[in-house]
C-alpha cells in the first residue's frame, strides 16, 4: 500500500499524559499536513510542512502541541498534558509540488479520559 | 475570511435517482475546490477538484461537480445513486490569492448522504 499511513490508529489516554502520533506520507510527496476532526465537524488545519520546514501553524496548535518532520519524510505530532478537549481524530495528509491534491491517511483517533 | 458552507446536514435519495450535495464557498481570491468522501472510521478519500478551465469536473465513482463563480457554488452530483455511495461528503476550498495560507484547506461541516434501496 503506497498511501499515507498513520500510527497508532487508536489511542486512549488519561488526562495529563503525553501522546505522540506518527504519519508516513506518500513517498514522493514533500508537503505534509496535520488536521484535527471532531464529531460533526469537518477537518480543521493544524500545521503544514514543506520538506522538513514547518511553514505554517494554526492558532489551534497551542503550546501543548508540537510537530516535527526531522528528515522531510515521516512526521510526528505530540500533545503534552492532554486534556479531554483534545479528544478527536487527527488526520495527516500529503501532497507533491506538482499537484494540489492532498491525500489523507486513515487518521488516529484519540480519546482522553 | 475563507469559509465553506454545506447547507444540508443530510441528503436522502433512492437508489437509481440523481443526487446533489450542495456546497458554497467564500474566499478572497481564486479558489481551488475539492470534494472528499469519508466512510466510517476512515480518513478522507479524494473525489474530484476544480482548479481552472471547464466548470464541469468529473471525478471518481461517477461523481461530478459544477463550479459556478457567480453563485460561489461547487455542488457535487451523480446521475444515478448507488447504495454504496452512502457516506459523509466534505467540500473544501483553498484560497489561491497572493499572501494566502500555504496549502491549507478549509472544510465544510460535511453532508451525510444516505442512499436507500
Image: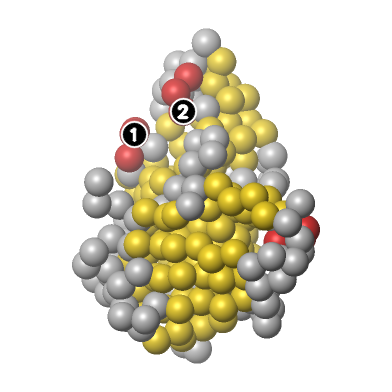
Q: Quadrant of residue A83?
A: bottom right
Name the chain under label 2: B
- Residue appearing at x 27%, y 68% in the figure: A29
Residue B80: image x %, image y %?
42, 23
- Residue appearing at x 35%, y 62% in the figure: A24
Q: Quadrant of residue A60?
A: bottom right
The answer, for residue B66, to whether it is visible in the render is: no
Residue A105: image x %, image y %?
42, 53
Residue B57: image x %, image y %?
35, 49
The answer, for residue B13, to whether it is visible in the render is: yes
In the rendered structure, which disc, 2 or 1, sits on the residue that comes first in sequence?
Answer: 1
Residue A18 against residue A72 in the figure, above or below: above
Residue A100: image x %, image y %?
35, 67
Left-right relation of A20 to A37: left
Q: Which residue is mark 2?
A: B85
Name the chain under label 1: B
Label 2–label 1 contact, CB within 8 A: yes
Q: Which mark is residue A15?
A: none
Q: Which residue is mark 1?
A: B61
Q: Report the Cα–Cα distance between label 2 and label 1.
A: 9 Å
- Residue appearing at x 45%, y 84% in the figure: A54
Left-right relation of A112 to A24: right
Residue nearer the viewer, B27 or A3: A3
Amino acid at each position: 500500500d503506497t498511501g499515507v499511513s498513520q500510527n497508532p490508529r487508536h489511542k486512549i489516554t488519561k488526562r495529563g499524559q503525553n501522546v505522540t502520533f506518527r504519519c508516513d506520507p506518500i513517498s514522493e510527496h514533500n508537503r505534509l499536513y496535520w488536521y484535527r476532526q471532531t464529531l460533526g465537524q469537518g477537518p480543521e488545519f493544524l500545521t503544514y510542512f514543506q520538506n522538513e520546514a514547518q511553514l505554517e501553524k494554526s492558532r489551534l496548535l497551542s503550546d501543548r502541541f508540537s510537530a516535527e518532520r526531522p528528515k522531510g519524510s515521516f512526521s510526528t505530532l505530540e500533545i503534552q498534558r492532554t486534556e479531554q478537549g483534545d479528544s478527536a481524530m487527527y488526520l495527516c495528509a500529503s501532497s507533491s509540488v506538482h499537484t494540489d491534491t492532498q491525500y489523507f491517511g486513515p487518521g488516529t483517533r484519540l480519546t482522553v479520559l | 475570511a475563507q469559509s465553506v458552507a454545506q447547507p444540508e446536514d443530510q441528503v436522502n435519495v433512492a437508489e437509481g435517482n440523481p443526487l446533489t450535495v450542495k456546497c458554497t464557498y467564500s474566499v478572497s481570491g481564486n479558489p481551488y475546490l475539492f470534494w472528499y468522501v469519508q466512510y466510517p472510521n476512515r480518513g478522507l478519500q479524494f473525489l474530484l477538484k476544480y482548479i481552472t478551465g471547464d466548470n464541469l469536473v468529473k471525478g471518481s465513482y461517477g461523481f461530478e461537480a459544477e463550479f459556478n463563480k457567480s453563485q460561489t457554488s461547487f455542488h457535487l452530483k451523480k446521475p444515478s445513486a448507488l447504495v454504496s455511495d452512502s457516506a459523509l461528503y466534505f467540500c473544501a476550498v483553498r484560497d489561491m490569492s497572493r499572501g494566502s495560507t500555504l496549502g491549507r484547506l478549509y472544510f465544510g461541516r460535511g453532508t451525510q448522504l444516505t442512499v436507500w434501496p
